[in-house]
Amino acid sequence: MSGWKPGLKKIYLPNVIFRLMRTPSLPPNKVAFRIPTNINKLDIKDYLTNIYKLDVVDVRTMVYAAESQINNQRYRPSYKKAIVTLGDDFNYPPRPIELKYSDAELFREDRKSRYRKLAGWKSRPIRVLVKQEENYKLKEEKDKQIKERNLDVEKSEGN
């Protein structure tokens, strides 16, 4: 009795990151993605149709060169931008909640306090905690606003 057994089917997903770019200048049936430079148009179409079940009509790509600023302090690697034309209109997902302090900023502040402690300075961990609390409060307020908007929309649709 040989046949399909659960857990034995292997599924291979590509190790590729497609970053959705919000471009209000494009028509509603076009979407822009920032993708690695080694991906071609056929791969883009195949990826979007098979994984996300999108009806892809056309794909256009542009390659942007790498940039380095004065004294090589900052470097931005090269990337490719793909503009995909879809059969239906595309609705962007809601924007993520913007917090006052980013995770990177909090990480830098924490690392700074650790280095100061190692150097014999008096530690000041209160700063990081205060910033984290401010972020948490902002997130809670924005969540409440979103819930209130959803309730208002449901009430207006019900009437």
Image: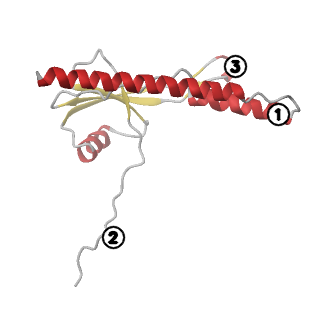
Mark 1 or 3 closer to N-term? Answer: 3
Which mark is nearer the camera, 1 or 3? 1
CA gap, disc 2 to disc 3? Answer: 54 Å
Amino acid under disc 1 = Lys
Which quarter of the figure has residue 71? Answer: top right
Q: Is residue 27 left or right of residue 73?
A: left
Which quarter of the figure has residue 27? Answer: top left
Q: Residue at x 54, y 20 (%)?
A: 100
Q: Is residue 117 left or right of residue 79?
A: right
Residue highlighted by disc 2: 8
Which mark is nearer the camera, 2 or 1? 1
Question: Residue 106, percent across and down?
Answer: 63, 29
**Label 1 residue SS:** helix
Q: Residue at x 29, y 70 (%)?
A: 6
User: Split into 4 quadrants, where in the image is the C terminus?
Assistant: top left
Number of residues whose C-alpha sits closer than 10 Å to that of mark 2, classed few (under 14), some (14–19) or many (20 or more): few
Question: Residue 48, percent across and down?
Answer: 27, 41
CA gap, disc 2 to disc 1? Answer: 52 Å
Number of residues whose C-alpha sits closer than 10 Å to that of mark 3, classed few (under 14), some (14–19) or many (20 or more): few
Q: Residue at x 38, y 25 (%)?
A: 144
Residue 71 is marked as 3
Which quarter of the figure has residue 117? Answer: top right
CA gap, disc 1 to disc 3? Answer: 32 Å
Residue highlighted by disc 1: 117
Amino acid under disc 3 = Asn
Nearer to me, 38 or 1: 1
Q: Which residue lies most toward the left here?
A: 159
Viewer can see residue 66: no
Mark 2 and mark 1 in contact? Answer it, CB < 8 Å.
Answer: no
Mark 2 or 3 closer to N-term? Answer: 2
